[in-house]
Image (tube, helix red, strand yellow):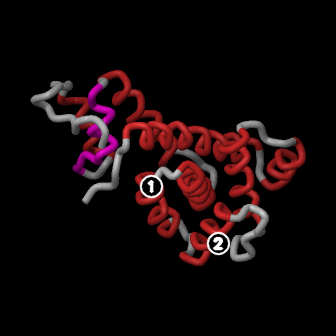
Amino acid sequence: MRIPDWTPEAKPQPDDLVNAIRERRGGELLNLDRALLWSEPLARGWNVYMGKVRTGLAASRKLRELAICTVALLTDARYEYHHHAPDFLEAGGTQGELDALQQYVASPENAAPALGEKEALVARYARQMTVSVKVDDALFAQMQQAFDTTELVEITAAIASYNMVARFLVALGVTPEQ
């Protein structure tokens, strides 16, 4: 990491905050947490908000994780991909789909035939949101046809949120845990 790992000695933080982060993480602090904990308001807000994006949305977990993996690959956020590719697999995705996603990100003109129709659509949407920011009307119309409004809002929020995460991780050089 490009900054020191946070420690309680270096920058004391309230126990309730550190405990809430540990609870959401299953008892451990991740390297991302060790960067965020340099700022109490940031760590507190991030923990609540990203916790909801990760586990509190109704939209398909598999599609959300696929979108997050797309963002991670496009932004070279290795930490993000390291954590979310297994979550994609746990949510029902396959290694073949991850391989197809990697091929699509490397060569967007390839349609990634191993991805299903909705998966390919979400990957294209995540790509436009990440690379161009603006989504063209034709692609947005396809998203509206494929998903109800709540799903569309939640998939969009997951992509937008993990673009923020990717930029934080890459700028600070946060690396996967050993």
Task: Categorize mark 2 by other alpha carbons within 10 Å: few (<14), some (14-19), many (20+).
Answer: some
Question: How many labels sit on residues?
Answer: 2
Measuring 47% from the left and 34% from the top, which residue is drawn there? 49
The quadrant of the rendering that contains the C terminus is: bottom left
Q: Is residue 96 left or right of residue 51?
A: right
Circle 1 Cα neighbour tier, 10 Å, few/some/many (<14 / 14–19 / ≥20): many
Q: Which residue is mark 2?
A: 100
The segment highlighted magenta reads 27-38
Specify whether residue 31 is painted magenta: yes
Q: Position of residue 97 (x, y in %)?
A: 61, 72
Image quarter for residue 100? bottom right
Q: Is residue 74 above or below residue 33?
A: below
Which is more toward the observer, 87 or 74?
A: 74
**Residue 146, x across and y down, in percent:** 81, 55
Tell me where residue 121 sits by quadrant.
bottom right
Inspect the magenta stretch and tell me whether residue 76 lies in it. no
Check the image and report above or below for 89 versus 173.
below
Element type where label 2 sits in the image: helix
Q: Which mark is residue 78?
A: 1
Q: Residue at image x 18%, y 29%?
A: 15
Q: Amino acid at mark 1?
A: Arg
Image-based side of 24 in relation to 63, left or right: left
Position of the N terminus, as image quadrant, is top left
Secondary structure of the residue carrying tag 1 is helix
| Residue found 22% across the figure and 39% down from its top | 5
Distance from disc 1 to disc 2, alpha carbons, whole Å, reads 17 Å
| Marks 1 and 2, the one that precedes in the sequence | 1
Specify the label residue 130 is tagged with: none
Three-letter amino acid code at disc 2?
A: Ala
As displayed, is residue 102 above or below residue 26? below
Residue at image position (69%, 76%) is 114
- Residue 25's x, y, as percent? 31, 49
